[in-house]
Image (cartoon, rainbow, N blue to C red):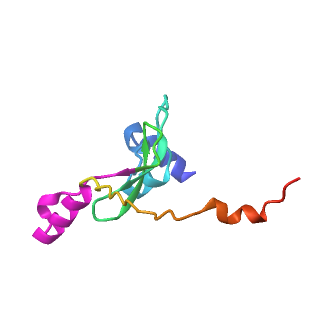
Amino acid sequence: MLGKVLLESLPKAIVQYRSISSSSAAVTKIHRSVYSRSYPTIVVLPDGSSINIRYHEPRKIIKLPLDVSTLSEAERKARIEARKPKRKIKIEEEVEDNFDSKKYLKYIKKK
């Protein structure tokens, strides 16, 4: 009863105060009157860590590019070589054809 009297005597702005922190914002839903369509997506950062986000296009994974200027010289050369297209190696085999079909005529039965 005393609490009710105190609440009525306080200004309305103080009574409606709501404590919002980063932890409560992460647990609750998105507070919007119109919900835009969003899809669960995984973002992979250049260091290999991943984050779950909501993205406006239906994609499974988004991989962020690596900054090549931060790599050492050997790592940079290896990455640039890996980006280049692979050369196709043509292997030509010479097959010696010494097959003689007349040799097997004796195994064919004539009717």
Residue in the image at 49% along x and 33% along y: 37
Residue in the image at 37% along x and 60% along y: 91
| Magenta region | 62-83
Q: How many marks?
A: 0
Query: Where does the image place residue 105, in percent across and percent down from the top left?
Result: 72, 61
Between 35 and 2, the one lying in front of the other is: 35
Outermost residue to the top:
34
Question: Is 74 displayed left or right of 20 in the figure?
Answer: left
Between 85 and 77, the one lying in front of the other is: 85
Query: Where does the image place residue 77, in percent across and percent down from the top left?
Result: 15, 65
Question: Is 60 displayed left or right of 82 in the figure?
Answer: right
Q: Main secondary structure of the magenta part?
A: helix
Outermost residue to the right:
111
Above or below for 33 versus 18: above
97 magenta-colored: no
Above or below for 103 versus 26: below
Between 53 and 92, the one lying in front of the other is: 92
Residue in the image at 16% along x and 59% along y: 68
Above or below for 96 versus 32: below
Between 15 and 77, the one lying in front of the other is: 77
65 magenta-colored: yes
Residue in the image at 89% along x and 52% along y: 111
Question: Is 1 displayed left or right of 69 in the figure?
Answer: right
Query: Where does the image place residue 39, in percent across and percent down from the top left?
Result: 49, 42
Question: Is 74 displayed left or right of 49 in the figure?
Answer: left
Give residue 109's quadrant in the image. Answer: bottom right
Query: Where does the image place residue 4, in percent across and percent down from the top left?
Result: 54, 47
